[in-house]
Amino acid sequence: MEQDRLGLGLSTASAAAAEAFREGNDLLVTHWPGAADAFGRAIAADPGFAMAHAARAHAALREGDLAAVPRHLASAEALAAHATERERRHIGYFGLFLRGQGAAALAALPEHMRDFPRDALVLDTAITPNGLIGSSGRADRHDYLIGLMDGLALHYGDDWWFGAMHGMALSEAGRMVEARPKVEASLAARPDHAWGAHALAHICYESGEVAEAISFLRGWLPGYAREGTLHSHLAWHQALGELAAGDFAAAWDTYLASCGPAGHTGPLRLKLTDGVSFLLRWELAGQARPAEAWAAMLRFARAMFPRPGFAFADLHVALAEAMAGDGAKLGAWVAEVRALEAAGRYPSGAVLPACAAGFAAFAQQDFAAAVEALAPVVAERDRIGGSRAQMDLVEFTLLRACLLAGQPERAAALLRARRPAGRVPVAGAPPP
């Protein structure tokens, strides 16, 4: 029987289909372009290969080809009766995930991973900062994720993919000493692994290793395809390093080339979040508000994200509305969020409306009001989703508002409570 990269059986008699499937899996988990084409070749070699159709649907979602997702998923489901139990359950899981039934998919995850711990494509949907666990609204999501990954580690050994994912989860939990060797080993085994590069960028960020982050990313990114899903997001990490180093000209150049609406080559959600968060950090670092850049981000946000529903993206839409909108649309947006919350369909609860109020007050230079809105919820920001690096924009906004509102004691308390991470790139913040 043919097998995938991790030794799980594949219900195809075609060696060519299995090889193309393995190639597509590697491209998908390393975040290189070409996965959809590889799965397409697998389907061409064996049209009855159910797993290839399911993977093709997943790749379509990753690439933003939403119209193709239901077509390929339906093909996988129609063929699942001829597959093994593991494959049928895999396809059933992706039926939930790809149809947006995140809570149901997450509920099915523990049993699936108990029975098939090396089903990496299922696991991959849940364990990134904006995966099913990250976007679940759980305040304890880091602990939950670490428990899951620690329990699976025995089944993966020194696998390069799992090592990078485990290391990233550990770094998000503040366990840098354990995280770095796993990520470095992953990159040594697979230097082109974009998620491994991403995990190392996060370790550098969390550890305050600004020079290392800039040097690594400037050296690694030129070898990565611009069409790779993480290319512009890694450029965003580079720009954050340049901001932290005080090299504002380089940071702005990086933003224009790779992070703003015109230069970003990644998925729509990252295009929104990377661009919006950089512009806020630019201002928090003491630079003048770039009105034209904010207007461009607002046009993009309104066109691509007309309705709320995914808290991490919604946070950035609210921020763009606060900084460049007229106030009325932000109010309507928050009202829609509150309606979803009241209906039990918004797991992060009231955190986002509070953040939106804080951002609006900050934009209007009512810094005392910004403090009052953000201070009660900053400790709950993990419920929105995203990485710690991404969610620092809430804490940094509160810190800058404290300083501008003449509340240095409150600012000092925020800094004391932060994990060690070197200098905070917020104008007026004292050095560590």
Image (cartoon, helix red, strand yellow):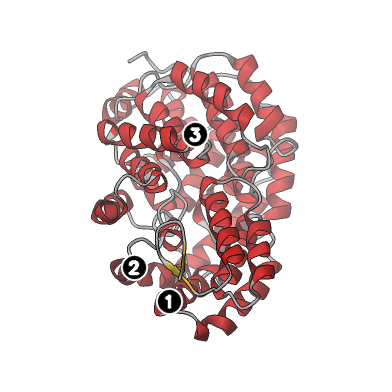
Please name the residue that numbered disc 3 is placed on: 191
In the rendered image, residue 400, in percent from the top left (x then y), is placed at: 46, 26
Front label number (1 vs 3): 3
- SS for tag 1? helix
User: In which quadrant is the C terminus drawn?
Assistant: top left
Asked if the residue under mark 3 is in contact with the one under mark 1, i.e. CB atoms within 8 Å, the reply is: no
Spot occupied by residue 294 in the image (x, y as percentages of width and height): 69, 35
Residue 59 in the image, given as x and y percentages of width and height? 61, 59
- Callout 2 environment at 10 Å: few (<14), some (14 to 19), or many (20+)? some
Could you say which quadrant of the image residue 118 lies in?
bottom left
The residue labelled by disc 1 is 89
Left or right of 167 on screen, residue 225: right
Q: Nearer the viewer, residue 428 or 370?
A: 428
* Quadrant position of residue 264: top right
The answer to whether the residues at label 2 and label 1 have Cβ atoms under 8 Å apart is: yes
Q: CA distance from mark 2 to mark 1?
A: 10 Å
Q: Earlier in the sequence, mark 2 or mark 3?
A: 2
**Mark linked to residue 116:** 2
Q: Residue at x 58, y 56 (%)?
A: 24
Could you say where residue 1 lies in the image, as x and y percent from the top left? 45, 71
Q: Nearer the viewer, residue 382 or 397?
A: 382
In this orientation, does residue 92 appear? Answer: yes
Q: State the mark number for residue 263.
A: none
Name the element at disc 2.
Answer: loop
Up/down of 192 relative to 416, above or below:
below
Amino acid under label 2? Phe
Q: Is residue 370 visible?
A: no
Callout 1: few (<14), some (14-19), or many (20+) C-alpha neighbours within 10 Å?
A: some
Q: Could you tell me how far apart the alpha carbons at marks 2 and 3 are, in whole angstroms? A: 28 Å
